[in-house]
Image (tube, rainbow, N blue to C red):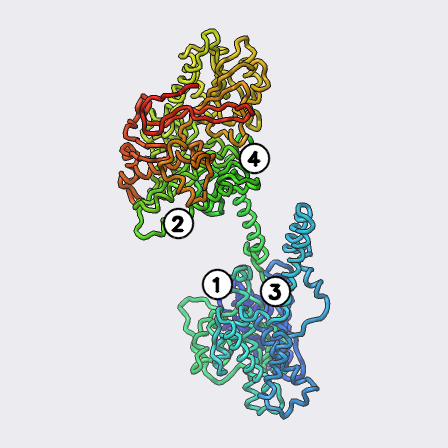
Amino acid sequence: MTSGSVRGGAGIGGVRTTAKYEVDALVQDLVAQFSGARLPMPVVVLYAEDDDPVLDAEVRAVVRSVQEAQEAGDLPHRTVPHTAGGDPHENAVGILDGLAKGPWARRGPSWYRGYPAPRSRLVAAIEAAVRHVLDDPAAGPAAGRAPEDLVEPVLARLRDLHWRPEPRTAGGELQRLLSPVLNSTTLIGAFVLAALTSLLTQATWQLVTAVLLVALAVLGASGWVRRNTAPLSWLGSASRWFATTTFLAASGRQAAAWSLWRPRMSWDVTQARAREVAGEILKARLPGTPPEERDRAQQFHLQLRTLALLEDLRWAHRSWAPDARGRKRRVPPVVFVPRADADGGALRVLGAISDVRSRRSEQDPLLVLAAVAHADVAAWLLDERTAPVNVHAVGARRGPYEDWVSDLRIRQAPSRGRALAWTLPVRLTRLQLQAGETTRLAPVPVRGSGWFLWSRWTLLLVMVLLAGAAGLRVQQLGGQFCEARLVGSNPDAVWRTDPGGTRECVGVATGSVGFGTDGGIRLNGELPGTASDRTGAGVGVGSLEEAVRRENERVAALPDVRFVTVVYAGSLTTAAGQQGRALNSLKELAGVYLAQVRNNAGDPLKIKVLVANGGQDMYFQADMVRRIVDLAARDRSIAGVVGLGRDTADSGSTLTLLQQAGLAVVSTTNSASYLARDHVNYFGLAATDEEEAAALRLIVDGLATPPDDRWAAVLTRVPTPDDRYSAEQARYGSAMLTGAGYRLITGGPIEYGLTSNGDPDYESALAATCHGGHPPAVLYLAGRADDVNQLMRRLSDDKGCAGKLAVLTGDDLTKAQFRTGGTGIAPQATLYYTALSDPATTARGSDLADTAASVLGLAPRGAGGNPYEDDVFSDGSLALAYDATAALQAGAAKAGASQLNGTGSVMAALRAVQLNNRATGTVDLREAAPLATGTQPGHGIHIIRVRRDPQGVPVTEHLCGRPAGETAPLGGCVP
C-alpha cells in the first residue's frame, strides 16, 4: 500500500512536524503539479495509523484546517457537510447534486466564473421527474408497481419540466425579457442603450419605434424558444454527451449516435437513453426491487451522476475552448470532505469517483481531500491483496504523489490492481496528529493569467470593435473606391471631387461599378420625367451599361469564341444641375454599343466593351487612363480605346501612357492637331482645329467685308486644365482672321471666365469687343457649345454690337440644340460652325439607322423620311463612335488579335483599314502616316449656317462639306 508516512518515522516531507503542515504541503504540491503540467488529480484519503476515535477526530480537524486556510485564497473549493442518518445512496446523490449546483467558494473574482453543470442538470432533471412520479398522490402508491409501468409517466413529467430539474417560475416575463438589454451595467446593455441614444438623436420616431418593436419581437421569440425547449437540446454539449457517452452504451441497448445535421435522430437517441436512465433510477428507489438488482441500479445511478459531474468539470477546463476557460482556470477545483463515512454517503462518492475514472480515458481536474475513520478504512480501503512493488531509481527522491502516479497504470488493471486505484491513502501517525501548533497554514497561491481578460463578453467586445473598425475601414475605402470592400476593393474605379465639389466615379466600370444614375440625361437630350415623344427618351447611361454587360456575357458564353475588348472612354458623369454636358458621351456610348451588336451578329472576331469615365469635361482624364492601362496589364484582350473626344491639358500625357501600354486610340470628336503628330497610336476621325479654321476661311472670304470694316474679335475661355480645345481654336482662328486681312480688337484673343456654376461670364469680354470704337464684323467664338446661348443673349441686348455680325465657331457647336429651342440666335447674328460629320448627307448608305431601330428601338421621324436628320443622329457623335468602334475591330482582325494574343499589333494594322459605306462616309486610315507633321487627309468636315427666320425661329442649313474619305477641296461654301 502506498503510504504517506515516511520511512523511519519522519513526516511527509522528511522532517518531523505537524500533520496539518504536511497535508497542506501535499495539497500545495498537488495543485502545483496540476498548474504546471495538468497532471491527474487523486482522491486523497487521510486516516489515522491507529484505531482511536481521538485520532480520527484529529484527522478530521486536519481537513478542516486546510479548508479554512483556503477561505482567504483564490483556490476554488467546496466542503461536503456530514449527513447523519437517511439512505446512504440518497445521501451520496445529494452530495453530488450539491457539488454540481455550486457555488464554489472563492475570495474574489480573480479566477474564472463558476462551473456550469449542464450534464449534471440533465441527469438531475430525470431524477426530479422520478421523484414527482413516485411522490404524486394522484398516481397512487408506487409500491408494487413495475418500473416499466412508471417510465412513461416519468418521461411525460420530464417534458413538462422542459428537461430542467425544477419547474419554471411564473411571472416577471417582461422584466426577464428586458433586464439584460436595458441594464447599463452590463456590456450588452451599454451597447443597446448607446445604440438607442444614437437612434433617438438621429432617426425619426417611426424608425425608433420599428427598431424597438423588432428588438422586442426577437427577444420574445428567443426567450420563448429558450424557455420551452430542452436545455441545450441537440446542439448543446449536455445532449451530445448524453447521446454519445459509452457509459450508457455499455449498459443499455441504445447505440451512441449524434449528428449535427440529423437533429431528429439525435433527439430520438437522447429520449431512448433518458428512458433507460429513468428505469434504472426507479429500480434504485422502489422498495420492491430485489436487493441485488437494487444494488446494481444504485451503483449505476451513482456512477452516472459522478460521470456527469466529472465531465462538467473536465469540460470547464478545456484549454482550447473559445473562451479559453482552461487557460484561466490554472488550479484544480478542490472538494474537502472532513468526515467521510458509509452512512453519510461520502464513501460511496469517493468510490464512485475512482470507479468512473478507471473506466474512462479522459482526465478530469477534480482534487478531493477526505478524512476517513480508521475503522472505515479497514473495511473500505484495505484488503489482503499484495500491493505492487515500488521500483525506484537510485538516488531518486519521490513523494506520495510520485509513487501513486507511477503505480496508477498497474493499479487500474482488474487482474492485479486495487478496486480504488484513484485514491491516494495518506496514513498519519499519532505523533504527527498530536504535535503542537507550530506553523500557520497559508492559502494555496494561485498565479494570475493574462487570459482572464478573454471571455465571451471580451470576444463580443472584440467582435464589435473589429466590426466597427471594419465599418470605418469600409467607409474609408468607400471614399476612395467606387466599389469598396473590406478585402479586395475594386481598383478600376475611384472617387474624385471636381472643382465644383461634386464627387464623381472615375475609371473603368468593372465588377458592379456603373456610371449611370436615375437622374441622368437621356438620349433625347432631356432628363427623366419630362414628357416627350422625342427619340431616345428611354435610353440613358445606366441602361446602355446594362445592355453592354449582357452582350459581353453572351459573347463570353459562346463556345470557342475569339474576341477583343474595346474600351470606350468618355465623360459620362457631371456635376449636379449640369447633366446635359454628358449628352455627347451618351451618344458616343450608344454608337459603340450598336457597333458591338452589329459586329457580333456575324463577324467571327467578337467585341466586348468596357466603359470608362473621365468625369465632367474629362477633368480626370489622367486618372481614367491610368486605370485603363492597369486593367490592360491584367486583361490581354484589350485591343484599344475608342473616344477620348475632348482635348484637355492631359491629352498628350495620357496618349503617351496608352502608347507605352501598346494600346491604339481611335478618337471620335477630338480635333486637336498635335496629337497625331506626337503619338503613333493615335487615329482621329475628326477634322483638326487647323482644318476647321481653314474651312471657315471660305466663309470669311465670302463675306466680302470692306477693308476698313474688317475688324474681328476672338473670344476664348480662360485656360483651364480640362479645356485645351478653346486655346487651340483661338490660336488657329486668330491666324486665319489675320490672314484674311482682319484686324483683331485688342490685338489678340479676348478671354472670358466661367461662374461658379459653369456659365460663361462675358461682361468684360463684350465690353472690350463691342465698345472699343470698332464694332466687329466677325466674331470668332473659340469656346464650347455651352457658351453660345449666353453669348447670343448678351449680343441681343448689347447696342455696341447691334450691327450685322458673322459669328464663327468650331465643331463643338454640334452639341447645341437649335431645333428644340435650347440654343438661341441673336437677331443681328448669323452663326457658322464646322461639323465633323453630317449623317443626314453621309449615312444614308449605312446600316446605322436600321441597327439603332432594331437594337435600341430608335426609330426617328426625320423630315423627308431621312432618319439621320433627327437630333439623335444629326450632330454626328453617335455616327463617329459607331465607325470608330468598327475601325478598331477591323484593325484587330487584320492583326489576327484575340483574347489570346496579338493585341499589341493592332495599332500597326489600323494603318491598313478602309471601311466603305459607313455612317460618316469612308473610314480610310491607310494614309494616316505615323508622326506626320502635316494634316492627315480624309477627314470629313461640314459647314453649317444658323440664322433666324422672319418668325425668329433658328433655321439650320448645311452650306457645304465633304464626307470622310474624300480629299477634294471644299466647294460651294457661300455665306
Tag 4 secondary structure: loop
Left or right: 313, with 199 as reference point: left
Tag 1 secondary structure: helix
Q: Which label sits in the foreground, 2 or 1?
A: 2
Residue 318 x/y as whole percent: 51, 64
Report the disc number at residue 576. 4
Disc 4 residue crowd, few under 14, some 14–19, many 20+, Cα 10 Å: few
What amino acid is labelled 3 in the image? Answer: Gly
Left or right: 300, with 131 as reference point: left
Residue 552 x/y as whole percent: 39, 47
Q: Which label sits in the foreground, 3 or 1?
A: 3
- The residue tagged 3 is 114
Disc nearer the start of the sequence (2/1): 1
Disc 1 residue crowd, few under 14, some 14–19, many 20+, Cα 10 Å: few
What amino acid is labelled 4 in the image? Answer: Ala
Report the disc number at residue 381. none
Disc nearer the start of the sequence (3/4): 3
How far apart are labels 3 and 1 at the CA level? 23 Å
Q: In the image shown, does 590 or 255 lie closer to the viewer? A: 590
Residue 475: quarter of image: top right
How far apart are labels 4 and 2 at the CA level? 33 Å
How far apart are labels 3 and 4 at the CA level? 63 Å
Disc nearer the start of the sequence (3/2): 3
- The residue tagged 1 is 37
- The residue tagged 2 is 553
